[in-house]
Image: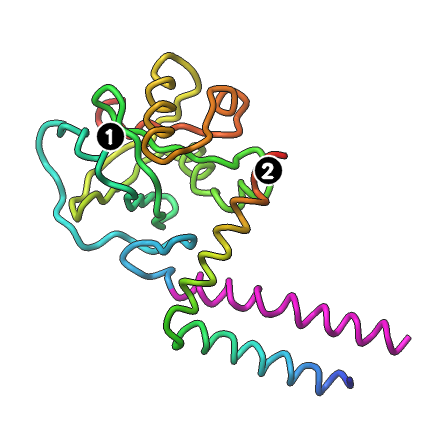
């Protein structure tokens, strides 16, 4: 009986360390002007808001990650970006498992809410709306870009099965 | 270990972990990198 009690206490301590570490990191960045690698940050504050016609998004080929902030709920994430045929897209992998959905919960929130977002690319802020893309030839360009840019293992089958979600970052007034 | 001592140990350890992450350089980055690898490995459909 004593051995079981000691084993449970040891297990509790082992679980305590990562739990406290995750809670601390999550709390630490929750109000930051931008996210960390894994944990969501707060509202994007710094940067100049872009006003004007749609830019030539091909410059994002040289941008590894962007900051994506949803308005509902107000939180920001670090994310990859793919440009294809003059439009920009983001993807969320790992959506087929509960752990993936927990990790990538922003995608569920964006899909189930109005999708309005603020994106920061190279210190410039762009108002956007996330529109999920389920199918179509446009996916081929997104897949090709993600593979060439990030060496991703993304497939069309993963998108069609719901394992990977694709969002186009449209102008808010476009849809 | 008695419950009272165990709770004190848990609280002390929690405080130590939090302070280490907050104030020791590179610890948070290393932990996040490890967490990212863990998630990438375990959140994929098998």
Q: Are marks 1 and 2 on the same chain?
A: yes
Residue A42: x, y in percent? 33, 55
Question: Which of marks 2 and 1 precedes in the sequence?
Answer: 2
Q: Secondary structure at mark 1?
A: loop
Look at discs 1 and 2 and give the one toward the viewer: 2
Query: Could you say which quadrant of the image residue A161 lies in?
Result: top right
Q: What residue is shown at x 33% (from left), y 61% (from top)? A: A31
Quadrant assignment for the N terminus of chain A: bottom right
Q: What residue is shown at x 78% (from left), y 70% (from top)? A: A8
How was the colour assigned to the protein in this rendering?
A: rainbow
B35 to B20, vertically: above or below: above
- Marks 1 and 2, how far apart at CA: 30 Å
* Magenta range: A1-28
Residue A60: x, y in percent? 22, 35
Query: Residue tagged by mark 1?
Result: A172
Query: Could you say which quadrant of the image residue A49 lies in?
Result: top left
Tell how many labels: 2
Q: Is A58 within the magenta?
A: no
Q: What residue is shown at x 28% (from left), y 42% (from top)? A: A64
Q: Identify the disc placed on residue A97.
A: 2
Closer-to-camera residue (A39/B39): B39
């Amino acid at each position: 009986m004593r051995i079981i009690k000691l084993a449970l206490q040891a297990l509790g301590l082992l679980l305590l360390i990562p739990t406290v570490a995750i809670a601390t990191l999550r709390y630490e960045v929750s109000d930051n002007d931008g996210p960390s690698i894994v944990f969501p940050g707060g509202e994007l504050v710094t940067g100049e808001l872009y006003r004007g016609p749609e830019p030539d998004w091909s410059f994002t080929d040289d941008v590894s990650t962007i900051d994506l902030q949803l308005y509902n709920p107000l939180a920001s994430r670090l994310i990859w970006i793919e440009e294809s045929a003059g439009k920009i897209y983001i993807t969320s992998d790992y959506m087929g498992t509960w752990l993936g959905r927990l990790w990538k919960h922003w995608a569920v929130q964006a899909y189930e809410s109005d999708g309005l977002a603020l994106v920061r690319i190279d210190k410039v802020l762009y108002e956007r709306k996330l529109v999920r893309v389920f199918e179509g030839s446009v996916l081929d360009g997104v897949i090709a870009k993600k593979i060439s840019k990030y060496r991703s293992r993304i497939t069309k089958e993963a998108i069609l099965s719901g394992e990977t979600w694709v969002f186009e970052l449209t102008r808010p007034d476009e849809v | 270990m008695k419950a009272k001592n165990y709770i004190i140990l848990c609280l002390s350890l929690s405080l130590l972990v939090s302070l280490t992450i907050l104030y020791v350089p590179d610890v948070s980055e290393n932990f996040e990198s490890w967490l990212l690898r863990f998630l990438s490995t375990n959140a994929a459909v098998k």
